[in-house]
Amino acid sequence: MQSYSLFAPAKINLHLEVIGDRPDGYHELVMIMQSVDLGDTLHLRANGTDQIRIFCENPQVPLDKTNLVYKAVRLMQKKYSKVSNNFGGLDITIEKNIPVAAGLAGGSSNAAAVLVGINLIWSLGLTQPELRDLSAFLGSDVAFCISGGTAIATGRGEKITPLPDLKDIWVILAKYNNLSVSTPRAYKSYREQFNHLYVTDLEDINERTDHIHSGDLVRAISEENADKIGHLLMNDLEKVVLPQYPVVSNLIDAFKAHNVLGAMMSGSGPTVFALCKTQKQAQMVTTNVKKEINDANLDFWVTKMCPHGITVESKGQSSKDKGQR
Ligand code: ATP
């Protein structure tokens, strides 16, 4: 049976604005998302059984039906039941490099890889917009993760407008490995504290949504102006997460003290990212911040902005797949 290995990059948010509530219970958001080179590799293989089997060495990743990867397979099996009967279930091995519950969309990117992988294994011929429509059933970040790169995401996060690629900006990611933030909880806190500011009128929501397209950050991205991009970073969720986690706030300040282009929390955190113009600067800042904070639980990654979402790494039957028979 055919097998695919796919690369699933993490994302950071360059802009995350909470506009208001939606009738479906989610938040109306305006975001600018950016893929980074740090990512997971997923090996997918049709197994000819009626089972979906997930393998992952990271103990934080569930291997049962709560895994977003499992949900993505079930979604495709239900939607394309006839085709799926010809192939049976799937064996999926996740090589986890993206920290879990970190605001980096690890689970969403894995689910996006499964949609792309099944589309290939079952020869469904679905287009990216069709895959994005399906992804809405799995989570708000999955749509972006399919195509990745740099993009505006509005609605729940599922309406994607691609932006020009940002190629030459380096990204330091830093996360306390003993800290994780629940995304639903962060949004719940935000609603509790700030719902008096929520925009309710549909016309006003549309105006706020449209504003991002002609805003300064999009202009800076089009001009590839790294200094301006660094200055214009914003994330509404910092207002609720940072007061609760002073160590995360201190980490952002530590990066800013080293004159990075900008530093901010990604998504609902607790990962912090800092932008640098060169790899050398990123490595130097990392060494210095590591020394200054001196906490064995603080992990760092030096990576780069990445111009794509899910990509195929290889096709065929890998030795890894064979080993799991
Ligand atoms: P987002 O930025 O989209 O809010 P996140 O990066 O904060 O996501 P994830 O890494 O996706 O968070 O993990 C959130 C929770 O989802 C974890 O606590 C884990 O139990 C569960 N989970 C389900 N599937 C996966 C997966 N494939 N990889 C990682 N976590 C998963």
Image: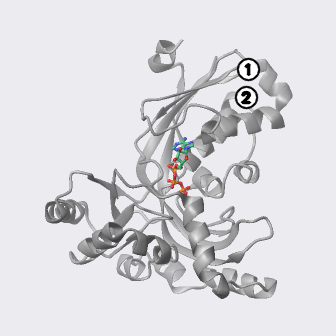
Q: Nearer the viewer, residue 54 or 120?
A: 54
Q: Is residue 10 left or right of residue 135?
A: left
**Residue 169 in sight here:** no
Instruction: State which quarter of the image contains the N terminus.
Output: top right
Q: Nearer the viewer, residue 250 or 290?
A: 250
Q: Is residue 228 above or below residue 287?
A: below
SS for dot 1: helix
What's the residue at 73%, 28% (across, down)?
Answer: 122
Q: What residue is pinned by disc 1?
A: 87
- Can you tell which quarter of the image residue 51 is in? top right
**Residue 236 in sight here:** yes
Query: Where does the image place residue 298, in percent across and percent down from the top left?
Result: 27, 55
1 vs 2, front mark: 1
Query: Where does the image place residue 321, in percent across and percent down from the top left?
Result: 51, 19
The amino acid sitting under disc 2 is Trp
Q: Is residue 174 left or right of residue 46?
A: left
How many marks do you count on the picture? Answer: 2
Instruction: State which quarter of the image contains the C terminus.
Output: top right
The Cα atoms of the two marked residues, 1 and 2, are separated by 8 Å
Q: Is residue 213 left or right of residue 6?
A: right
Query: Where does the image place residue 222, in percent across and percent down from the top left?
Result: 50, 76
Which of the marked residues, 1 or 2, is nearer the chain's N terminus?
A: 1
Q: Nearer the viewer, residue 108 or 214?
A: 108
Q: What residue is pinned by disc 2?
A: 122
The amino acid sitting under disc 1 is Phe
Considering every residue shown, the one lying at the far right of the view is 82
Mark 1 and mark 2 residues within 8 Å of each other at the beta carbon = yes
Q: Is residue 268 above or below residue 63?
A: below
What's the residue at 61%, 76% (across, down)?
Answer: 192
Query: Where does the image place residue 232, in percent across and percent down from the top left?
Result: 44, 82
